[in-house]
Each structure stands twice: as structure tokens, then as C-alpha cells.
Amino acid sequence: MNRGTLPGPVVAAGRSMIRGYGMSTAAMRPGPDFLLIGAKRGGSTSLYYTLLEHPQVMPLFPNARLLPKDNHTKGVHYFDSHYDKGAAWYRSHFPASGRRSGKVVGEGSPYYLFHPLAAERAGRDVPDAKILLVLRDPIERAFSHYRERRRQNAEELATFEEALAAEADRLAGEEERIVAGQPGYTSYAHEQQSYRAQGEYAPHLRRWMEHFPAERFCVLAAEEFYADPQGACDTVATFLGLDPAPLPTSAVKVWNAAPSQDLAPATRQALAEHYAPYNADLEAILGREFPWTRP
């Protein structure tokens, strides 16, 4: 079924009907077994869709095969942008318990890692969820994030350097407004123009570890996932209590990549110096090295 052939009102009505049904049956829909919390532009989309190739990992409700939709839904963005919609709305996105025997389901919303309230909300509402996190070289992540915004005509500044220079002013007071505001308050600048800040992984991870125990985390490096997707998915399967399963040869697709070969050397060096203490702290938290910190 091709969504493009259907009138917009028909698609909207169908979505509303399905979501209404999901909400009316929310009591029969357990929450997520896992949350893939980020990082944005860090490989979370590629990892999520690769995990769906495992026979014991279920997609969110409704399954894309039942809709005029190319791909399964990846993320709900409940704990960051849609918390005001309530628990029944959130659970409406998950399969009913009767369909989940021996299987797991989760969602991947990459803004969760950086959002100042997401960890607290998730710790309160889904305390038994396991936490997946895939991290990419923060320099590559920052530039990829900027390139994505430019590609979508959502960033007015013509160079990455201009965007980095404007970041502090753009973000000034935004985290405080999110924390102090109504549950539905969202900040475009905080989510989409935080190119440098979102790669400061250590303090964001520490915030999540205040609400979930360390053994509930599985942290992957995007570079290692792309180099050995089968090994990475086997690691995640074991973490989720599943048996490893072979991936089909067509399973791994690199989504949303934006390589940084044209990044100015001076900009790269400045970012490397900026991220050095955050990288050191991250490695101290997790007791491991990451590919981008190796000489």
C-alpha cells in the first residue's frame, strides 16, 4: 500500500482511529522492554532497524506492514516532547501482552539522552526498562547533525563554524525553560541546534544513571557497530535476554550518515580539545575506551 496515493485526510483519519484503538486497549499493552535513548545522529536509527531483524524483537504498534508506510515507527518521543499526552497514549504504541510471549519490544528516541527531564520521567514510569545507547565520535556526530539540518532547510547559518559560534546564545536558558515549563513545552533550539552540546556524552549518561542501575545499560560505539553489525547485535540480544540470531545480508543499512571529510582542520582540532575531558569522563564511567579516543 502506497501512502502517497491516499488523500491526506484519509491518512490522518486512519492514524487517529488506530491511535484511539491503541489508547482504548492501553491496559493490555505493557510498556517497553528497552529504550534506545540516543545519541542523535549517532547510529540509533541503523541499530534499531537492524535489531528488528531479530525474530524475537517486535516492532511498535501498528506494524508498518498493515499501513501505507515504508518503515516501522522507531521512536515515540514520549519522555521528551510528548509527555503531556499521558501514559495511555504512550502504551498505545506497544503490542498487546498476548502477542509478546518470548519477544521484546522497545522504542528509539535519540533526544532522550540529551533532554533534561527524559531520564527522570522514564525512571519513574518504566523503571524496569533496559537502556540501549549507541555513541558516535562526537565531532562526526556534531557535523552530521548540522548537515542534516541544512539538508532539510532547517538551519539558516551557512557554515558549521557559524552554527557553533551561535550555539551558546541559541541554547541560553532553554534547559531551564524545559525544566520549569509545562510538560508539553518543547525547544527547537535545544533539540536541533545543540550541535556541540549533544556530543558531551558523559554528563547526559550520568543523569540517566541516577535513575537506572549501571547493569541496565548497554552502550555501543557506532564505529564498532558498523564494522561488525552481527557482533554488536549479538551483544544487544544477550543483554536483552535473547538468543543471538544471524542477520540477513541485507539487514544493515546506514541511515542518516553525513561524513565530515570537508570539515576544516582548525574546527576539528577545536572540537577535539573541547570534547577531550568529556571523552575521558565517559571512559571512566564505563571502564572502556572508544574508537575516537585511540591514537
Image (cartoon, grey):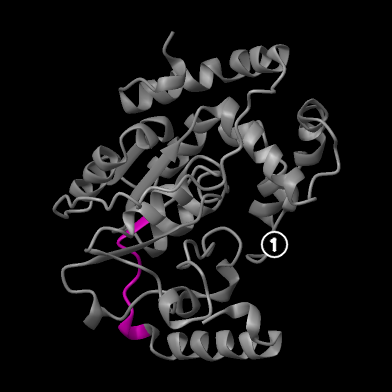
Residue found at x 49% / y 62%: 75
**Secondary element at image label 1:** loop
Residue found at x 70% / y 84%: 8
Q: Quadrant of residue 280?
A: top left
Q: Amino acid at mark 1?
A: Tyr
Q: Is residue 185 above or below residue 172?
A: below
- The answer to whether residue 239 is magenta is no
- In the image, farthest residue toward the front: 249
Q: Which of 135 and 128 lies nearest the eye of the viewer? A: 135
* Total tally of numbered discs in the picture: 1
Residue 154 pos. (x, y %): 78, 50
- The answer to whether residue 29 is magenta is yes
In the rendered view of the protein, which quadrant contains the C terminus?
top left
Q: Is residue 100 above or below residue 276?
A: below
Any part of residue 16 in sight: yes
Which region is colored magenta?
A: 27-35
Residue 121 pos. (x, y %): 47, 58
Residue found at x 43% / y 25%: 282
Q: Which of 142 and 286 lies nearest the eye of the viewer? A: 142
Identify residue for label 1. Answer: 185
Residue 158 pos. (x, y %): 85, 35
